Image: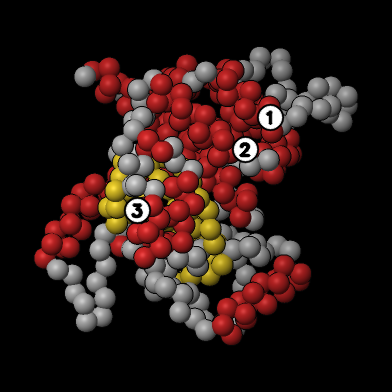
Amino acid sequence: MSFSAPYVEKRTRKRVFLRQMDKLLNWIELEKEINKAYKRGKSVDGRPSYPGLLLFKMQLLQIWYGLSDPAVEDFVNDSLSAMQFCGLQLEEDVPDHSTLSRFRKELVEKKAYDRLLRKINRQLKDKGIMIKSGKAMVDASLTDSPFRPKGKTEYHIATDRKEDDRDENDKQQEEIQHKLIKKEKPGVDSEGRWVKKGGKLHYGYKKQVATDENGMVEAVHTTTANEHDSKGLKTVLEKVPKEKKQEVFTDKGYKVPDNDTYLKKQNIKNRIQHKAYRNKPLTKWEKEFNKLISKQRYVVERTFGGMVRWFGAGRARYKGMARVHGQHVMEAIAYNLKRSPGLLAVRCAQ
């Protein structure tokens, strides 16, 4: 094998993947949705600004290849396959990082990312890549923010996956401290929150996702890191099409009366794992039930693992819950698209 062979192989894989992505979707239909949120104006020198679809594709490249705004600008400039994927000609200029940032801000403000996820998923279902009806698997994962405050807190910190039993004084102190942070420390993300997990402190946010039986992401909901998982079930499920939540599978962290009541009212089969309480251990039947649920819901844990392995998910790129939510949804879109060629090949082989 020559010295250059691995490099050539890597470039070939990238070229093949981006060609697959270019052919996978009806991008014109997607562009219509993008343009509802992104209105093209004029650049500083009077020329028309860049198309929204071009900027959206550059955002996908950022997720797939772990690139910052300046880095993705260089990436597209240096890669012919990336330039072709974005629909650029050799003589055309690549949008700069400030243009990308403004585009992202506009889509966040218009709450466009959730709509784009739904549009893309609808196309994937029409192609037989995603399942059209059935079960929803729900779970949560922390996203650490690098823009966390330094120094000691003056209140007790909530523990992940446990009911927040702190007294009102602790909760008030937390809000007071974050108001001071927002006023006095502009470099800190004042919207994030602290939480303890596995004995370690985390600052930032929590993403809750609902996937189908193959682990493809149907919906995303973002909260502060200290919000209990159980509070997000209704919100994330409301983003899932009715036919895709005939049964809901999730772990015992979601086992609260409000969720049981909600699922019953919606005529959704309740597959939340049972939880033991003090002086009330699980029955033999409940233990067996929990084992059966675990065998079904592992796919959502695999989804989180794939996002971390492929995209470095679990670390916030931006400040503020709205922008971090946009990041979460873009990671979901990038994940679904990356897995699509493999799922399509399996379908064609059957």
Could you tell me how far apart the alpha carbons at marks 1 and 3 are, in whole angstroms? 37 Å
The answer, for residue 340, to whether it is visible in the render is yes
Q: Which residue sits at x=41%, y=21%? A: 126
Say above or below: 191 vs 338. below
Name the amino acid type tagged 2: Ala
| Residue 243 place in picture, x, y as percent | 37, 35
Q: Position of residue 45 (x, y in %)?
A: 88, 26
Percent from the top left, x then y, of residue 206? 49, 58
Pick whichever of labels 2 and 3 is earlier in the sequence.
2
Q: Nearer the viewer, residue 117 or 95?
A: 117
Q: Nearer the viewer, mark 2 or mark 3?
A: 3
Amino acid at the residue labelled 3: Lys
Report the number of numbered marks. Answer: 3
Give the residue displayed 27% in from the left and 67% down from the top: 275
Please tell me whether mark 1 or mark 3 is closer to you in this view. Answer: 3
Please report the residue visible at 36 percent of the width from the left and 42 percent of the height from the top.
245
User: Which quadrant of the rendered structure holds the C terminus?
Assistant: top left
With 297 as the anchor, is 285 left or right in this view? left
Left or right: residue 18 compared with residue 184: left
Look at mark 3 in the image and give the residue it sits on.
264
At 72% from the left edge and 67% from the top edge, which residue is drawn? 182
Q: Nearer the viewer, residue 141 or 240?
A: 240
Could you classify mark 3 by the number of other residues whose Cα lies within 10 Å: few (under 14), some (14-19), or many (20 or more)? Answer: few
Confirm or deny contact between disc 1 and disc 3 (CB under 8 A): no
Which quarter of the picture shows residue 258?
bottom left
SS at circle 1: helix
Labels 1 & 2 near each other (Cβ < 8 A): yes
User: Is label 2 in a helix, a strand or a loop?
Assistant: helix
Q: Which mark is residue 112?
A: 2
